[in-house]
Image: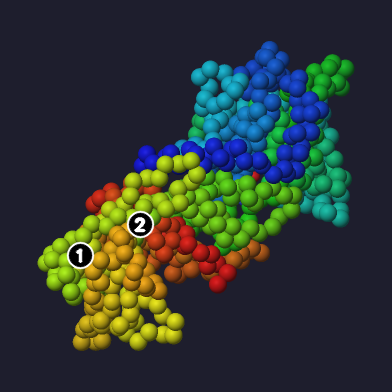
Amino acid sequence: MSTSPTHATHTNTANAAATEAAKPSNFLRQIIESDLEKGSYATRRWAGSPGDAAHHAAGQTDPAKIRTRFPPEPNGYLHIGHAKSICINFGLARDYGGVCHLRFDDTNPEKEDTEYVNSIIDAVRWLGFDWAQIGQAPGSAAPYQASDYFDFMYRAAEHLIQAGLAYVDEQTAEEMRLSRGDFGKPGVDSPFRARTPAENLARFREMRDGKHEDGSMVLRARIDMASPNINMRDPAIYRIRRATHHNTGDTWCIYPMYTFAHPIEDALEQITHSFCTLEFEDQRPFYDWLMERLSEGTTLPDGRVVGGLLASPPPHQYEFARLNLTYVITSKRKLAQLVYDHKVNGWDDPRMPTIVGLRRRGYTAQSLQLFAERIGVTKSDSWIDYSTLEGCLREDLETKAHRGMAVLNPVKLVLTNWDEVMGAGHLEPCTQPALPHAAEGTEPPPARHFTIGKEVWIEREDFEEVPPKGYKRLFPGNKVRLKGGYVIECTGCSKDASGVITEVLATVVPDTKSGTPGSDLVKVKAAITWVGVANGVNAEVRMYDRLFLDAQPDAGGKDFIESLNPNSLKVVTAIVEPSLANAVAGQQFQFERHGYFVADLLDHVQGEKPVFNLAVGLKDSWGK
Ligand code: ATP
Ligand code: MG
């Protein structure tokens, strides 16, 4: 992100502070701490790159105390839920002297795209994490790709077949579904289950060699058709699929199933702790079964002992609750639908919960890290209130975002005595701090400069011809301060033929300029924001609101399109002070009294065409 030098200074300081702060414990930390204490993984070896047992046995003792991984499927842009997973996996590795692997889970040939691969790399880096760390072989800083392990996966499948632990099933998909049984009913053995290893091996090789149609047969693990866990009833582990893979091209016409591929990927990379979301809990018995079968020596029916393909001890899977955020959808598929149906303007639309969208909306990496820490990790699903996310951004920007004045709904205010008391055409320079409360230990940035003259822009709502009870701003006879400028006294207004107010009229009270001696002798009840007509700059301001009106837009199979908020974007032409017009794209500001805004990463042109996005209001408005 491009930021001004002062901005970067604050960012670094905040980063250091976040790292130093004591982290509250959670069940994942307890698991890791217990494993470190017991030395569960102390004997592991690491050869500098992923590989099988023999490969790692030739390596050194792993310099990484633990290995975690973040394994996205490159089939879409990452969202706030992934940010949680990234912060957990990379954060825990960092905190315990370990390494987190970025791994593209690209075993599904159809869906992947390099656009997504690049966006994932950017997102992880932007969030402040890196995967090229201790123990990696020189020159291997690239993320890992699951498709690089296809050869090993094939070998593992042949091994299972030879050990009598897998068979080729030629039932139709429907027959397989019916014979699997259900929760109350055990499954029924496939007629192909009793084939010999030699028959299965021959058949599997035919599958590999393209002798059979897509979908005509699958390789299944041979476990237990009566298991109370349906995932253990001989799950499919390889299927025939003629599709060109972005990495391996047309080398393969069979591809491993996710449930088979994922544990193997973890094991080849010497992952110690494989953290995933709760929906994978039922897969854990298969994960463990496969790890045991592939790491132990197996006695073949003919008495030979083979195996030990994967290094021991194998990785373990642990599940945590996925993030559910109110008013937000966290499913790549559904987010893709919003993009392709043009309900939003792309993956990086500031209303999207994607990392690119949040970033464009004005979210900082620190605010997302803070959010991940604040929500913690739990073992049961719950909904996090959207205001929690917004609160983290406000908290982060409070001491970082420079202040500035912007008038969002302008009406002109004319100081009718200005020429007389200040001199015709006079422009009086004013100055205000850019950051009234800089974070402790940081140097405050240079002050803002702007001018006041005969005409200034004020908010339309700051004038009432007939004031409602308790109104303290401009009405005939009342005095207010133009913030950082002078005290003025309202005298009336002008209107057009249809009664719309075209100008508010007032007189300036001399010798009341902010910061000059005696300026506070004239007491006022309110200070209002304003921008001088002479140096104000027109800016496009995009006022964003929640994308959905329903707090749980896709819960219980609801059609989330129906609860889209028709007013989630309102564009206004605002007038901003010079320091805002000179913003760098991506820089956050507090528009005084209005909220936090960011100079749009794509459309803002510094000093020429200011474009701002509303990031978050100053106060929580979600409950109202
Ligand atoms: P989606 O359903 O949006 O496609 P996914 O889980 O299929 O998500 P992956 O690319 O497979 O997406 O996910 C990579 C990692 O991110 C996984 O380990 C997954 O558990 C985690 N993850 C995905 N969504 C969430 C979420 N809402 N909260 C926490 N972690 C998540
Ligand atoms: Mg997925």
Decide: few, some or many residues near mark 1? Use Cα within 10 Å; few <14, some 14-19, many ≥20. many
Question: Which residue is denoted by mark 2 in the rendering?
Answer: 404
Q: CA distance from mark 2 to mark 1?
A: 18 Å
**Front residue (pair 580, 446):** 446
Picture layout, residue 181 above or below residue 310? below
Does label 1 point to a residue whose CB lies under 8 Å from ligand 1?
Answer: no
Find residue 102 and name its label.
none
The image position of residue 557, as x and y in percent, is 64, 63
Which quarter of the image is occupied by the N terminus? top left
Is residue 524 visible in the rendered image? The answer is yes
Q: Amino acid at mark 1?
A: Gly
Q: Earlier in the sequence, mark 2 or mark 1?
A: 2
Picture layout, residue 320 above or below residue 503? above
Q: Secondary structure at mark 2?
A: strand
Find residue 453 and name its label.
1
Residue at image point 36% right, 52% down: 433
The image position of residue 301, as x and y in percent, is 87, 22
Q: Residue furthest top?
A: 58
